[in-house]
Structure formats: structure tokens, C-alpha cells
Amino acid sequence: MPITSNEISVEVNGQKYTLPAGSTLGDALKVSRAPYIAGTAVGILKKTAEKRTENVTEYAIKTPRGELRIELKDPESSSGKLWAEHYKEYEGKNIHWASPEALAFGPFEADIKPLRETGSFEAFDVVFGAGGFDSRNTHLILSRKRHAAEYGSPEDGVFATIVTGRNLIFRLSREDSILSIEPIIEWEQLAEKTCTTDLSILLENNDSVFTYFEVELSRNAPKGAEHFYALTREGTLNVDVITSSFISDDSLKEEPVPYENFEPRREGAISVRTVGYGAGRVYVSREERPSSLVHSVVGQVTKGLELIKLAEKGQKLSVESLPPQIVLLGHSFEEVEPVLSSIGVELVRDGYTGKDAVIVRQDPPTTLEIFGEAKVTAYAVSREKLIEVELYPEIAPKSVDFFRHSLELKTKTVGKLPVYMVYENTYLFKTEKEVVKYKEILPENTPSGRVLAGEIGITNQAAKRMGTIGARLVDDDLFGPTGEKFSSTNIIGRIVEPERLKGIEEGDAIYIIEAARRRTDDKGN
């Protein structure tokens, strides 16, 4: 229907909506029900602020099972030109054949000269191939893995690469088809654009609104993907650093991540620095960058790249990850089993299996490995051994950072803490990671009067037993929770239910979960 003078047309995350003239950004979010987290920034791009490029190299191919994107290697090659001139003719084509090595959409007639020779193909290559070396029986072939085959391809061979939606080609079958093919038009932002948290801003006709971005995580980087899940656990990404080529979130800087995936950092690539200064920092590329031996690529933005380009320093952005993270730690078998069953993952119970069992460890440890194996072993303990703590990052930031890093609470919801010594009403613990070898514990938030029962202390570097963690079941006016004098003790938080420590012995282990995080996890289930 045509737009009247009393209406405006607004696009929200690619979907068009008709709104009354005078509508605000908040109105558009309500009508569209777009993914949005309160307090995050929303990008607005004016129609007049778009400058479209003529040279299209990327195309979105939609199928019943999702969308994948291909990027042309050379638009001026014969196959590149053939694709650009005829891609709309391939819409509606079914998968004619599929094998472990490749799948083919078609057939269709194409102006190619098939070669009778074996070609070598890498995973995610895209090539034209003529069945029976007959150009009237041409197919669009997508490679699933490295292999050699005789497809009757033209001389220029591979003309494109699948750059996003790569996991999709392993789920497609002969029942599937190409629903649509659309070029991805790049734009350069001019003066009329904004990224704001102010939902009262008035929208104008033909404004484009971007509320979130979507990330497809790479199966080639399961540990790096888990790092990204941890970073965005609340559904947001912080814009701590911004340059013309990237934005970055420094929240997990110094958290170790292994190098897993060497590939070019395309526009929208998610990468993690794995060594050197800034290790653990997560980057989102705003423009194409070469591969790096210190940046492991862990994912790719598949929707909302415009928001990445419009973001400003200090903002938070809403983000959704694919696939969603599998979170077992801190939950019961009964809570997670139906969820795992619904996604085709088998649950194997290990450890304590009573009614009050709570999961504290899982194998494989990462979401993408669990999906890959379709099976996970979950180790549980009695809920009495899950200790909720409230930490004090505002008044003891360095010490709390030491504690979270030591127990891996920055990247996991539950951390293991071995019992080092028990005497009278005092419980001492030492972390499995020898963090004291590379992290200092300067005096911070040292007590000046009474230490209350249940408060958690860490021995600082003023004493020999630096790094020891302790708690007591009684108040004390002379010594801290680790048995040291007050000047050698940093108070970092408190145990919500200190009586749960009763009965634990030397050599045991307790499991720590932050109280605020426990409440957040419970809301999500």
C-alpha cells in the first residue's frame, strides 16, 4: 500500500514497517518487536546518507534451512561475469545431487566450456560444473570438504567462496532449493547517521534502524567461540576501543585463549588476540584485514554489520550468537536434559546423581564440540557443595579480578576451589591455577575493625602465603579469614550461606558460583 502524508516507512533490521508520522525510535522498537536489550545503542541510517557501490562481490543465497553468503574471487572472470548476469535464473533450483564432498543445485543451461580434467577443491569453494560435459546440464556446485573431482568445470574453475553460513551446507539435502539470491550492497556512511540510546528520537521516512547484530560462530574455533559466549553472556558487547578498521571489547583481556583458526579477517569477522599485549581482547572487523598469527578468527557477523560500523566508543551493543550457548554448569540434570534432548544431544550423567545434584563440570567443555559430538557427559555434586558468593568488585577490583581469573569465573559460571586446610572455624583454599606466579595481589580493602563470619579474604603480598583464600564461620577482631593480620588480608566478598562450609575436609573441593550470576541463569531457564 502507498504511504500517506500521515505515515512514514521505516526499516528495522531489514524489515519494513509503516508508522504514523512523528513516531519515535521507541515506537519502532515496540511495533517491530526487534531484538533489543534496554540501554544498548541503536544505529539509525538516513536514506540520503547511503552511497552504494557499483562493484558487487558478495551475494546472499536463501534456502529453506537458512542463508549462506558467497564472495566472488574475481568479478571480471568469465564465471564471475556469468554469475553476475544470470544469478536470478538460479532461484528455485533444487539440489540435484549431494555427496559427502559436495552438493549441486541445478541443472540449468549456461555458456561455459567444460574441461575434461580433474580439479582440486577446498572446503567452501563454489564452482560451475557441467554434468556429462554438457553445458545444458550445468550445476552450481558447493564444496563441503577438500577433494578432487571431475565436474566439467570451465577453465577459470572456482569463482567464489562461501563466507558465512558455512555450517548450512552440511545440513542441506535433496529436498532443499534456492529460495532467493540477493546482492549485498555495501554503503559508506556520510554525515546523516547516528548511534544512540535515546529512544525518544523522532524517525523520518525511509530511515533504517539496526538494533542488534548476529554472529555465526566457527566450528574451527570451539574454544575461541566459548570465549565469545562468555564475553557476551548478558547479550551485549562493549565498545571499548574503536578505529576505522575494528571495534573491540576488552572485558576478557588477559584471559587465555588458544590459537585455533587462521583465515582472513573479513568485514564483520570476530577474532580474538591470543598472544602479546591485549591477549583475550575480542575484535569485530569493520573492514577487511589480512590473516594474522596472533588473531584467531572465531566467528562472523551475519546480520547487523551496519550497527558495528555506526557504533561509538563507550556504547553497548545487543548481540545474538548462533548456535546459542549450551550452559549446563550450575543446573540440575532435570533442568538440562529436556533442553539437550530437543537439540539432539545425549546427556550422560556422572558423579553424584541424587535429587539435589548440580552440574559443575562437562565434557566436552565447549558448545560447538557438544554439537559436533551430539553427546555430553555432565559431572555433578550435591547442591550443598555449590557455594554462592557475593563479590565486591567496586571496593576490591584487583583482588576480585584475581579471584575470578583463578577460578575461571570470567569464562565459566561455576569454578572449582580445592580445600587446602581446615582448623577450628577456619577454611583455607588454594586455586588449581598458580596465578600468583604472574599476578600481583597488592593490599586492597584491608579490614580496619571486625571481620564478619562468612567474609572471603585473600592473603596479599605483604605475607608469605600470598594467594591463599579463606573464610571463617565466626567474627574476628584480630585476624582475617586466612589467619593473617588485617594488613595482609584483602576482603573480596562474602559467602551467602557460610554454614554450607560445615563438614568439608582437607582434600575436598567446593564449587563457587556468583549469586548475581545464579539469578541471571535461573531467569534464562
Image (cartoon, rainbow, N blue to C red):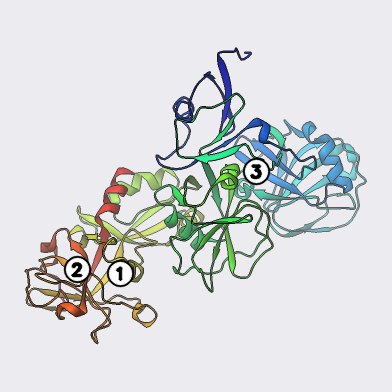
Q: CB of mark 2 within 8 Å of CB of mark 1?
A: yes
Residue at the far front in the pictured view:
191
Residue at 64 percent across and 46 percent down: it is: 169
Disc with the residue nearer the chain's start (1 vs 3): 3
Q: CA distance from mark 2 to mark 1?
A: 10 Å
Residue 36 at x, y percent in the picture: 45, 38
Q: Amino acid at mark 1?
A: Phe
88 in relation to 212, above or below: above
431 in relation to 54, above or below: below
Compared across the picture, whether 246 is left or right of 184 comes to left
Local secondary structure at mark 3? strand
419 in relation to 173, above or below: below
Residue nearer the viewer, 6 or 1: 6
Compared across the picture, whether 439 is left or right of 137 comes to left
Q: Which residue is under mark 1?
A: 403
Residue nearer the viewer, 388 or 315: 315
Q: Which mark is residue 345?
A: none
The answer to whether residue 515 is seen in the rendering is yes
> Which of the 4 image quarters holds residue 270?
bottom right
> Which of the 4 image quarters holds residue 483?
bottom left
Q: CB of mark 1 within 8 Å of CB of mark 3?
A: no
Q: Which residue is under mark 3?
A: 68
